[in-house]
Amino acid sequence: MLIFLGVALTLHLWSTSPQSPDLLGSTDWVASPLPLEMEGGDPYLRALMRTISAGESNTADPYRLLYGGQRVKDLSVHPDKCVTIVNGPNEGNCTTAAGRYQFLTTTWEYEARNYHPNRPAWYEVWEQPSFEPVYQDEVVYGWLADPSAWNIDIAAQLREGNVTTVLEALSGTWTSLGYGIEDNSMSPLLPQIYEEMLAEELALQTVGSQTTGSPAG
């Protein structure tokens, strides 16, 4: 058993060693966060996810975005590319933030183990879960939907209209939401953006319900 674990750890370290992912050019900023790739789910949480991306990755290609604006071509796994931070309290350090929700490599690996729909089994320590767009969404959705992860029921708080309470609770993870060590130009606009995203998501849910519930002609 110890031999197996030793081999598995060696393979894991080899598979997670820094790589040089193929990079694409930068992408355009957009006026409104794009729709999610995942289907279904609570419209309140979906609106929150789009609001998070407004502060973290509000571009035309958010799922491929690296810190600094470049994009990664391969999303089969987290790109794990460390990019130097150019401003803010962590200036000079480097960050592996990537994707629509700017997951650090270590955060992605941990949360994907909990919420990825196709997460590796416990003994597949060398396997890395897919970082494709729909899985980025599904991991974040599962994470936000889990009250034990945040010590509050985020969906319930949103239904009660406590958007700022939620943003404050999440700001330690996504600093662009405000209330933490740094913010950006989007931070003051996020409550309004959330309301706009919620209106869109509720409208989409209504249309979907009418479509699936309509009798065949």
Image (cartoon, rainbow, N blue to C red):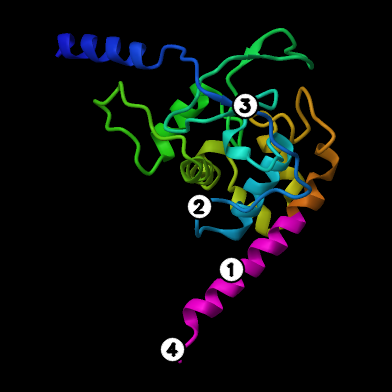
Of tags 1 and 3, the one toward the viewer is: 3
Return the residue at label 3: 66
Q: Do the CB atoms of the residues marked 1 and 3 lie less than 8 Å apart?
A: no
Of labels 4 and 1, earlier in sequence is 1
Q: Which of pointers 2 and 1 indicates the residue nearer the eye?
A: 2
Q: Earlier in the sequence, mark 2 or mark 1?
A: 2
- Residue extent of the magenta highlight: 195-217
Q: Is residue 65 above or below residue 82?
A: below
Which amino acid, by three-letter code, is at mark 1? Answer: Gln
As drawn, the label of residue 2 is none
Residue at horizontal 52 percent and vertical 78 percent from the top: 211
Seen at 75% across and 11% down, the residue is: 91
Q: 30 or 194, which lies in front? A: 30
Q: State how far apart marks 3 and 2 are (Cα).
A: 21 Å
Tag 4 near tag 2, CB within 8 Å: no
* Residue that label 4 marks: 216
Mark 2 closeness class: few <14, some 14–19, many ≥20 residues within 10 Å: some
How far across and down, in percent of the image, does residue 108 sit? 49, 29
Which residue is under mark 2? Answer: 38
Task: Provide the secondary structure element on which disc 1 rests.
Answer: helix
Tag of residue 205: 1
Residue 196 image position (x, y, % from top left): 76, 58
Compute the Cα span from label 4 to label 1: 20 Å
Looking at the image, residue 35 sits to the left or right of residue 41; the answer is right
Q: Is residue 161 above or below residue 145?
A: below
Give the SS element for disc 4.
Answer: loop
Q: Are marks 2 and 1 in contact (CB under 8 Å)?
A: no
